[in-house]
Image: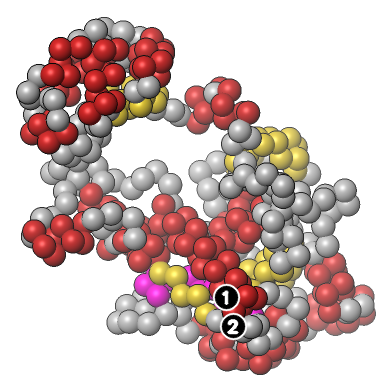
Amino acid sequence: MTDVGAEVTGPLAGLRVLELGALLAGPFVGRLVADLGAEVVKVEAPDRPDPMRSWGQATYRGRSLWWPVLSRNKRCVTLNLRTSEGQALLLELVARCDAVVENFRPGTLERWNLGFDRLRTANPSIVLVRLSGYGQTGPYAERAGYAAAAEAMGGLRYVNGYPGQDPPRAGVSLGDSLAGMFATMGLLAALYNRDALAGEGQVVDVSILESCFALMESAAPEFDLLGKVREPGGTRLPGIAPSNVFTASDSKKLVIAANQDSVFRRLCAAMDMPALADDPRYATHRARAEHQDELDAVIAEWAARLPAAEIAERLNAEGVVCAPIYSIEDIFADPHVREREMLVEHDDPELGRYMGPGVLPKFSDTPGGVRWTGRWEPGADNEAVYGELLGLDGEALDGLRERGVI
């Protein structure tokens, strides 16, 4: 069911996944596994297409620029899961799939008589990946949950930004993407368990809230054992020095991180201040933490005298961690980005050729790839999917359309 000439080489080739739901977290799982070769069939309601078809910060030729990236490599079908006939068709698809990914509010599939018990009757080996704001159980399970709320309650927003200021968002829908990555990990782990150990599928329950909390490092034992509440640190790592953002003479900003003793000594040499490495205030990791403000001021004064390119050249030559703070324009101009295929060309029938994000991770023998961009019309693959997988002919499909099933 791939486009003509679109060879599937990814490590997940042969895997078939049904993607239910809309917006970001669930569809991000579909994108990740589709990039790696899985056959992903995205199901949308005939009268309620995924809002991501029109959402986003920018459009081109009247089209959302988020949709073709999020939905690339997927087949798109329409199916009304609120009808018994639509539910029966879904179960036929489930019987031919390895996994189902959904991100409805908990209880929605059950109201449609499509809970895991029923899916499992159609396919005992099916893996059901469920993403929601707060998980399938617990007192908050039925709450509506967006990434912004999960980032807030998961602790990420609290430690972001500057002390005394309202905590900003990360600039992207971080919580949704984190949940999508954890869900992808869970999907692959459940498939391994099914194929290598148990022989049966299971439910993977992913909470956006918990996905955010999982990134909170040692904040839990810090509070439990010491009563310490981790606070926002602005541009630096509190107690880890030096690791901060510094401004060059040409107003460009760079991250300089040299918190290990050996790396700090190399930084001092690169700044032509070798004696600084033996100064008792800075000679050890703990001493640098206690004098972080003073040390940052010394480095800031040095950086302000040099252009960013010279700072980067000096520090990288000495093995000091240093990186410019890139905008998307800077990313496009970087040769490493191109060589590593962080940007790859997409060819879309509506948008033409454009650069989009590459496929991760990299595989030596079975690389993933972009086989096609997102389908612009809901149900664009109805004939291919229902005909090829379920054997329905044109007359049967016409009848389903007339009855509002697809």
Depicted 314 relative to depicted 93: above or below: above
Choose the circle earlier in sequence order: 1 or 2. 1
Q: Residue at x 15, y 42 (%)?
A: 163
Residue 193, numbered label: 1
Q: Position of residue 334 (x, y in %)?
A: 54, 23
Please tell me which residue lies in front, 198 or 352. 198
- How many numbered discs, if any? 2
Q: Residues within 10 Å of mark 1 (few under 14, many from 20)?
A: some
Q: What's the distance in space between the residues labelled 1 and 2, CA to CA? A: 6 Å
Judged left or right of residue 283, residue 342 is right
Q: Which range is magenta?
A: 126-135
Please tell me which residue lies in front, 360 or 389. 360
Instruction: Look at the image and say whether residue 155 sits in the magenta stretch.
Output: no
Q: Position of residue 243 (x, y in %)?
A: 25, 31
Judged left or right of residue 134, residue 62 is right
Residue type at numbered disc 1: Asn
In what element is the residue under mark 2?
A: helix
Q: Position of residue 315 (x, y in %)?
A: 35, 17
Residue 198, numbered label: 2
Q: Position of residue 270 (x, y in %)?
A: 29, 12
